[in-house]
Amino acid sequence: MQLENKVAIVTGAAQGIGLGIAKVFAAQGASVVLADVKEDAGQQAVEAILAEGGDAEFVRTDVTEDEQVRTLIEGTVECHDRIDVVVSNAGICTVKSCEESTVAEWDQVMNINVRAIFLAAKYAVPHMRRQGGGVFLNIASISSFVGQQNTPAYCASKGAVLMLTKAMAVDYGPDKIRVNCLCPGITDTPLLRFHVRHEKDPDAHLERRLGRVPMGEMLYPEDVGKAAAFLCSDEAGGISGASLVIDGGYIACAEFFR
């Protein structure tokens, strides 16, 4: 198993991509700490993982709050004696243009999508350094590379995730700490459904978007989880500062018509 005996934190793990990653990590032998603000969903996720024979626990955490992130990290180390992997997956999206957005909405997207990664690094790096290394995986997006309509805060935040990943990889490489980001495309998650429901005909809109994907299919959270497991495993030992796009070829296209 790729992650046997690893201790991993996954934020935003109560649903969507975070849950997919947590499930795959547990199946690959990791002890997984699921962090989220959604307590009921988080507990249900843990119960599902335990029922499959995995090792998991839930810690309610607001990833934008300094003390809560510190408590998450230190509690994990106290319980497991180490922390091998931190997956910063928690994220939100607002579907509004710049002039339509409030300052509070803009700040909320930046805080959850970017500030949370800074806080995770701030508190996890010292523990990883003392134990001789570790891995950070930041969940970015194809919107780290290209724009999309009516989501400027989201696109800006995911561009920041990409560059923060590179900066962390440079700073912490000497400590044997690897830092990468994963950039999913159209993935069947509650966040995607939230995004497309702003369209007059959500199903037709989603079908049009999938029509631009060469492989023609939506991804599922477990697909992203498998890629995440590889990047966080010892098999990816030489990979740091990288961005792995998993999107069925979506952003490879200048033109593509099914």
Image (cartoon, rainbow, N blue to C red):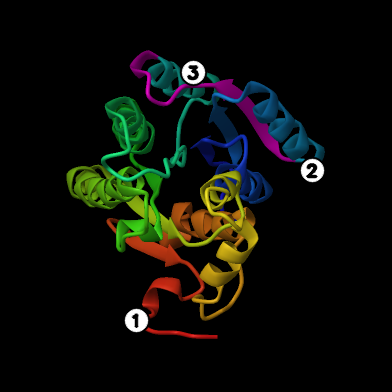
Amino acid type, callout 2: Glu
Relative to 7, does residue 24 appear above or below in the rendering?
below
Q: Mark 2 highlights which residue?
A: 52
**How far across and down, in percent of the image, does residue 214 sit?**
51, 81
Q: Which mark is residue 73?
A: none
Q: Quadrant of the N terminus?
A: bottom right
- Asked if residue 52 is among those painted magenta in the image, a careful observer would answer no
- Asked if residue 60 is among those painted magenta in the image, a careful observer would answer yes
- Give the mark, 3 or 2, whose residue is nearer the N terminus: 2
Which residue is nearer to you in this view: 196 or 216? 196
Residue 248 visible within the image: yes
Q: Mark 1 highlights which residue?
A: 254
Q: State the separation of the CA atoms marked 3 and 1.
A: 47 Å
**How far across and down, in percent of the image, does residue 170 sit?**
18, 49
Question: Please, what secondary structure does the residue beneath circle 3 have?
Answer: helix
Q: Is residue 115 left or right of residue 8?
A: left
Q: In the image, which residues are magenta?
A: 54-67
Q: Quadrant of the C terminus?
A: bottom right
Q: Is residue 98 left or right of residue 210?
A: left
**How far across and down, in percent of the image, does residue 242 sit?**
31, 60
Q: Which mark is residue 75?
A: 3
- Give the mark, 2 or 1, whose residue is nearer the N terminus: 2
Seen at 36% across and 49% down, the residue is 151
User: Which numbered mark, 2 or 1, is in the foreground of this view?
Assistant: 1
Seen at 81% across and 37% down, the residue is 51
Q: State the separation of the CA atoms marked 2 and 1.
A: 43 Å
Amino acid type, callout 1: Ala
Within the image, what quadrant is residue 47 found in?
top right
Pointers 3 and 1 in contact (C-beta within 8 Å) = no
Q: How many labels, in total?
A: 3
User: Which numbered mark, 3 or 1, is in the foreground of this view?
Assistant: 1
